Image: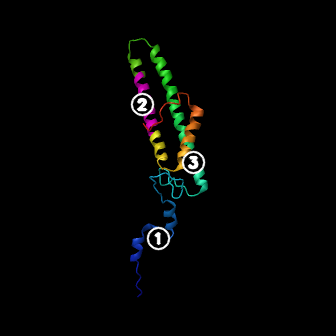
Amino acid sequence: MAHHDHHHMHHMGPSAGGDMMHEEAYRCSMNMLFTWSTENLCLVFRWWHVSGTFSLIMSLLGVVALSAGYEFLRELTRRLEVPNEETSSLLPGSANAVTARRNQKAHIIKATLYGLQVFYSFFIMLLFMTYNGWVMIAVAVGAFVGYCLWGGASATKSVACH
């Protein structure tokens, strides 16, 4: 009876055989220094892996869109705040139950939009923290595009993470 030694296969794990290519496709490097390299570049998630020129271009366009979308969210929040402020200034000084509920609902909506802005800004920060020059430029281009399309407020307002 022939004896087959399968012991070595246990050390190879799931990357043995055909899975090696699959695992290589999802290897992500994490840079802590500025780089222009896109080798093993993943953006925030393991599945957002840059594997070539086409995926780099598509990823950078996605980053531009995400960064521009942040300015859209900020403008949407500003537009929703203005009618609420005008309405509350037109109401008589006595706060009845309807006014109190309306103010509470407006406050919840503003708090939700604020939370979304904080989450969104931290997500963009994580993209920037890839320390990849191409991604950093895409974030800045997206901010520019978003401000051109939806920037209704002062350009001096901070775009800090929080």
Mark 1 → mark 2, Cα distance in angstroms: 50 Å
Q: Secondary structure at mark 2?
A: helix
Q: Position of residue 61 (x, y in %)?
A: 59, 46
Mark positioned earlier in the residue sequence (2 or 3): 3
Residue 96, located in which quarter of the rendered image?
A: top left
Question: Given the current orientation, which residue lies at the most extreme bottom position?
Answer: 1
- Nearer to the camera, 92 or 75: 75
Q: Badge 3: how crowded within 10 Å, few (<14), some, or many (20+)?
A: many
Label 1 secondary element: loop
In the picture shown, does residue 154 fall above or below 25? above
Comes first in the chain, label 1 or label 2: 1
Label 2: how many Cα within 10 Å (few below 14, some 14–19, many 20+):
few
Helix, strand or loop for disc 3: helix
Location of the N terminus by quadrant is: bottom left
Residue position for label 1: 16
Q: Which residue is mark 3?
A: 60
Q: CA distance from mark 3 to mark 1?
A: 33 Å
- Image position of 69 with respect to 77: above or below: below
Residue at image coords 54%, 43%? 139
Three-letter code for the amino acid on which mark 1 is drawn: Ala
Mark nearest the camera among 2 and 3 is: 3
- Residue 51, position as x, y percentages in the image: 56, 58
Q: Position of residue 26 (x, y in %)?
A: 49, 59
The answer to whether marks 1 and 2 mark residues whose Cβ atoms lie closer than 8 Å is no
* Near-viewer residue (83 or 129): 129
Q: Is residue 12 left or right of residue 146?
A: left
**Residue stretch in magenta:** 103-119
Q: Which residue is mark 2?
A: 111
At 40% from the left and 80% from the top, the residue drawn is 5
Is residue 107 highlighted in magenta? yes
Of the 4 image quadrants, the one containing the C terminus is top left
The residue at 42%/31% (across/down) is: 111
